[in-house]
Amino acid sequence: MLISEKITRIIEEMLNDGNGITEIRRNEFANTVGCVPSQINYVITSRFNKERGYIVESRRGGGGYIRIIRPEMTGSAYLCHMLGCIGDKIDAESAVYLAKDMYAKGIISQREAGIIISVLGNKSAYDLAKEYSEYSRAEMLKTIILSLIQLR
């Protein structure tokens, strides 16, 4: 198991045990896990960000901490949150993650997730320059999410 996967698993367990909230002291946590503190930052930035539905707060200094909050959102509240997080552009990996997450939360079916992934993933039919494809992907994903909100 990669160290980033191990860190992710431990943080997810801490969130589950803490009813969706956990606080981490970065240096202590890094020592416990057996990695450098920057690895903790990387995992939090890439896997526990607002695009994935988390709220991250930090306080620097001797009593500093990183607080991770996983708000419980379902249905339309989750879709509205995701709509606000997409921004002007989104890469294929993030779009695929969102589709899988919507499926995992029961918002869309496995078939619908598969369709979204095939359209918005890296192997999609449109072959635009990367800078344009990320803008197009964001617009398509926003349209899909707006349609899902209207259907609720």
Image (cartoon, rainbow, N blue to C red):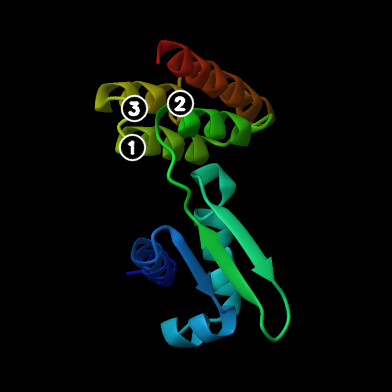
Query: Reading the chain from its start, which is encountered first: label 3 or label 2?
Result: 2
Q: Which residue is mark 1?
A: 105
Q: Could you tell me which quadrant the C terminus lies in?
A: top left
* Count of picture labels: 3
Amino acid beneath label 3 = Ala
Instruction: Name the residue located 49 percent from the left edge and 81 percent from the top edge.
Output: 29
Question: Mark 3 or mark 1: which comes first in sequence?
Answer: 1
Residue 29 vs 43, above or below: the answer is below
Q: To which residue does mark 3 refer?
A: 113
Between disc 3 and disc 1, the foreground one is 1
Q: Which residue was labeled with disc 2?
A: 76
The residue positioned farthest toward the front in the image shown: 19
For residue 46, which quarter of the picture?
Answer: bottom right
What distance separates the C-alpha of mark 3 from that of mark 1? Answer: 11 Å
Instruction: Say if mark 3 contacts mark 1, CB within 8 Å.
Output: no
Q: Residues within 10 Å of mark 3 (few under 14, many from 20)?
A: many
Amino acid type, mark 1? Lys
The alpha-carbon separation of the residues under discs 2 and 1 comes to 12 Å
Nearest to N terminus: mark 2 or mark 1? 2
Taking the spot 59% from the left edge, 58% from the top edge, the residue there is 56
Q: Residues within 10 Å of mark 2 (few under 14, many from 20)?
A: some
Question: Which SS class for mark 3?
Answer: helix
Q: Quadrant of residue 111?
A: top left
**Label 1: element kind:** loop
